[in-house]
Image (spheres, grey):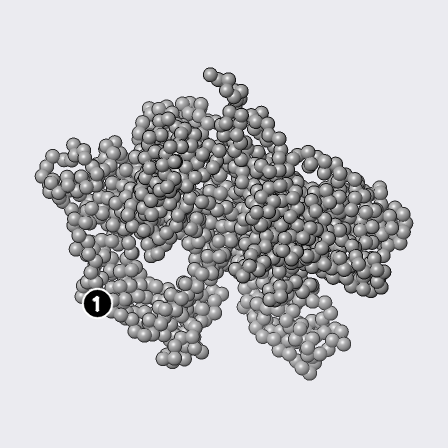
Amino acid sequence: MPKKKQETEKSADSERIVLTTQEEKTPAEPAQAKPAKTEIVTPSESIIPVEPTIKRPEGMSRETAEGITRHVFKQVKSVLFGLLSPKMIKKMASAKIVTPELYDKEGYPVDGGLMDIRLGVIDPGLRCKTCGSKLKECIGHFGYVELARPVVHLKFVPVIYLILKSTCGSCGRILVPQEKHEKFKTFLERIEREEGIEARRKAIKQVIESLKTTNKCPHCKAKQIKVKIEKPTSFVEDDRRIMPVEVRARLERVPDQDCELFGLNPVVARPEWMILTVLAIPPVTVRPSITLETGERSEDDLTHKLGDIVRINQRLFENINAGAPEIIIEDLWDLLQYHVTTFFDNNVPQLPPARHRSGQPLKTITERIKSKEGRIRHNLAGKRTNFCARTVISPDPMIRINEVGVPRIIAMKLTVPEIVNDWNMAYLKKFVNKGPGEYPGANYIIRPDGKKKKITEETKEAALEELQPGYVVERHLLDGDISIFNRQPSLHRMSMMCHRVKVLPGRTLRLNPAVCAPYNADFDGDEMNLHIPQSEEGRAEAELLMEVQTQIVSPKFGISVIGCTQDGISGNYLLTRFLTLQRKEAIELLATVGITDFSRLPRKETITGTELFSLILPEDFHYTGKLKDGSMLVIKEGKILEGFIDSKAIGGDGEGLMLRSLHKQYGPKNIITILNNISRLGIETLLRHGFTASSADVDLVVEAKDKVKAVLDQAEQDSQELIKKFHDGSLELLPSRTLPETLELCLMERLNKARNMCGEIVNAYAKNPKENQTLLMVRSGARASVLSLVQMGAMVGQQALRGKRVDKGYKNRTLSCFKPGDLSPAARGFVANTFKSGLNPKEFFFCSMAGRDSLMDTALRTPKSGYLYRRLANAMQDLRVEYDNTVRDAAGRIIQFEYGEDGVDVAKSESGKIDVQRVIDQV
Amino acid sequence: MHPELKEYEDKMPAKLLEELEEKCPASKLKRAAVKLYEEYCNSRIESGEAVGLVSAESIGEPGTQMTLDTFHFAGVHELNVTMGLPRLIEILDGRKEVSTPLMEVFLKNPYNKGKDLRELALQIKETLVGEVVAEYTTNIVDLQLEVHLKKDRVKELGLTSGAVGKSIEKAIKGIKLSNSGDTLEISMKNRDKHSLNELHKLKESIKEVYLQGIKGIKQALPVKRKEEFVIVTAGSNLKKILEMDFVDTERTTTNDIYEIAAVLGIEAARQAVIDEATKVMEMQGLDVDIRHLMLVADTMCVSGEVKGITRYGVVSEKASVLARASFETPIKHVINAALVGETDPLTSVVENVMLNQPVPIGTGLPGLISKEEPHGKKD
């Protein structure tokens, strides 16, 4: 079957492959399309010699004489691509198809029909006549049809055309004088090396055209007639059509050495094989029929198409034998060509697509393979797994950062296989005893021969009896089991991390809000996936390479992506900046967080927040860093000496520099505890202290309000002045800008300045975050920004559409309530009200316009960046660091001599650098 | 270099050693060097690491956060430059045509302090006749085109009306041109072409006649950057600009990567890819480590010429048929592979995923060879 890579054939014996390659060397053979041949290497040959059998899929367990299961793994070493010769097609076929009928009256497949059971079985109960196996065991076998007249294979038309054009019509030699062959060959090889096979073909055409001055074959001196192509599949010479038979005869005459000039490898691809004389019939397993509810059978599109081919082929045979007039035969021949063409590709521009009776186009081979939903990207490169779960997520700050809360219902469906041995027998029997309905129980036991047995109330006793070393028990999920947690789109490696299972009541998956950032998750209905690795290797890799604590530092920039969020930040900010606690309170708070060692707590009655926080830090921790407001945070010997905690110290997503430093010095194991404690401390603080944002928080004092008003008035006045200047032409032009452009630029700048000034006013008057908790959120970096405060308290500001002021809507005006040509701020989307005071209808409309604009931007950007990402990933996926520290691609080409010029792993560096100063300080 | 650091010369990057020598007091130097070496070894990348994919993720993920907002001022109010996602796509695609070509021309000493700045800018800028024309009048009676020149503009450019006329005569064949002061009178030589229609066509082509300056430079604007003046140009022609003797050839750049590759070679082009991509990232306030951009730039430039991350560029050079087929146009790749009789060595990732085999990357890379005792012999 053309183009269908036959992975299914992997286990075919290598002998046959040797045989076939030899056969194909006889070039006179008639032929056709092209599957891949597969070499098989058995590295484990020395362990257990397996005789290659078709029945046994690779990697299957195999019982040795001792009765112990051993695994046999075969590995495909390489895949060779080539065309199938007609001889090869016949050789690999197990049935010759002669009739378009599918089933007889009893509904049994007809011998020699398209559903012949020698081609494999798709009905339960039947046995394959070729290999003797049942449904699902038999991988299917090819058949063939002898075509009454040869037809052209659509996908090779360009190559056939090139060969016809460039070779002599009578002797078949390439139209290049013998003495120039060598030069020509080196020239073409250079082109192919530099620009690829396609460029090579183009170059052949050009060279031949430039040589064609004589119109005479340089070898046999025959006169040459120009061959033309009549799309899609016919060739014409001097208005006379060259039928495929003749095309084939000409291609046969091309000697092997000339084939090589065309870039063909005559061993695997003789040109005449591109004209089909026999057609390989794909196995029925490739085109299974489905039985409808009514009991009717519905055949696959490919079967329909093959039916057409066989039917017309038979008719053609009959007509030829009956000596029908040439015109009828040619018509049928063309029809056969059409069917074979659409069998390969039903989307040929010049042909009407073959359709179902309902009018829907058939999905034939090309459509099956290509595009995102095709075989390659959908089935081969995209894999699916068992043992996974998906539901809505919700937050739980009480579980640890590296845990995931799993609903009990899920924990009773997902299982972990455990191999029974003498030491864990009693332990595993407990699970079997509980069965599948009670937690923690077990769902299946697997016998050493691979037979899977379901545990039910009835079989429980027998299963307990039967259990012995070597059996496998699939027990329910327990706390501490390893799982892989994922949220789509999986844009970076932190989108899939390993979490420990924590079985909880409820129906949602729970995660600590601190890991929201790397997953980009929120709880507005997001769903996430959970996978349970089933092998010891899988679990080990997940634990060592994917666990949350190993992923804290992003390889994107070498800063931590996991850190405290929201309450975790604002709580710690409040605590370290403003609070002083009674000793008793402090101890209670720490105890809730999980600290039991109070020896480092200062021996006094009142404890400040910073002193309390310092207890969480390791005793020998030193850190100096900037905070959000520009002041310094100084930590010496695990004590905060100066400053307080905010998002620049403990935040996630590239913010928490103190966390980065902790991670570097104390390693992933400790950081997880520290981060957990910090986060819990913040939350517990807020729980005790209370935290309320009120609408009064965004009110400005009268003085500030007046200032804002003055700013607004001034902006309005200046704008009017600019507009006036614009109208009387006295506005000074910016270089190479038109007058309206200049005005827009000036106005935008002026209005932006107004908003910035408002920001400064709000900033200056909002002084006391302790009293104003909305402000506290802003100052701590937990949520919102000064801009949000300005929009709520002072003014919303200019709404932009496509980076400009609003200028769309009606002719010369944005809304019908404005005068045409009104350029004033209010008429072009400037919103002077605040979100709290409320917008007027015009302002509201402008805000909606800006909102829609940003929505559109997002919608347009996602597919663009997605495609860029796919291309990058595809181009670079096989680059790796070799043992000699060079970066190489799959072909072994050196891309870099040393990764990133210094060999430093970004995830192990501190924002891409090694901190020399810290090393010096430590010595 | 300090003698204490000699032994580390080949073991650590020179940059690190320099920093150490600079910051560390001599008394501690030896101990610090030992410690730093340890730290460096711990920070090294491990063999088998899938650096390519990590880089792709690190660039692809922020891509989703970028704005589509195309234009930004290149430090000057007058010039728009494509930025954001479209520009990043443009760089990585390896497009030959840049949507907004731009150059930064640095100047040599007396000029970068402001000497003759405007004159230099005018010298660089490509001037067409259209710019110096005040008005065109068509004399219908004589079928003649009268071109009135802007006097001051012509003078400013250091030209005369005669020179303008010569340029026109040189560029357009078959015309008669007479010069009277600031007006050029032009008529067709060929009698058959005496028609209003032809005159109109003539007018249009006169507008496009090249007068002086460097071809391709649409605008040249002097800008103050920190302590010195530079000329920012819209349009790019690196080769010609570098030939000007007042230009600081070391720092002058363009944002056209192909031009850099052609004029300065592939290593310069690689650096240009890195610089341009970094610029885009910084503009958007995104933090991506430079190593990732380096790796992308290196993949684009290994072959010796700039290749885009597209099916015609980098992807088409892959060794594996299946890997190429899994990207785009699978049928084409499989057909061509069959004709050539290509062998897929299964050395990269996707093919092995397709065949359900371990991928030769990361933990899939190391193999273990062991001799197994004949079974049952042990005890």
Residue at left 37%, top 79%?
A818
Residue A192 visible from this viewpoint: no
**A214 sits to left or right of A817:** right
Q: Nearer the viewer, residue A642 or B201?
A: A642
Q: Quadrant of residue A545?
A: top left
Tell me residue B345's x, y (percent): 61, 37
Above or below residue A881? Residue A730 is: below
Classify mark 1: helix, strand or loop.
helix
Residue at left 29%, top 56%?
A785
Q: Nearer the viewer, residue B153 or A31?
A: A31
**Amino acid residing under circle 1:** Asp
Residue B145 visible from this viewpoint: yes
Residue at left 21%, top 41%?
A593
Residue at left 47%, top 37%?
A451
Tell me residue A164's x, y (percent): 79, 52
Q: Quadrant location of the C terminus of chain A? A: top left
Q: Nearer the viewer, residue A401 or A317?
A: A317
Of all chains, the one bearing label 1 is A
**A695 sits to left or right of B236:** left
Q: From the image, tell me which residue sits under label 1.
A: A706
Tell me residue A697's x, y (percent): 20, 60
Q: Nearer the viewer, residue B347 or A658?
A: B347
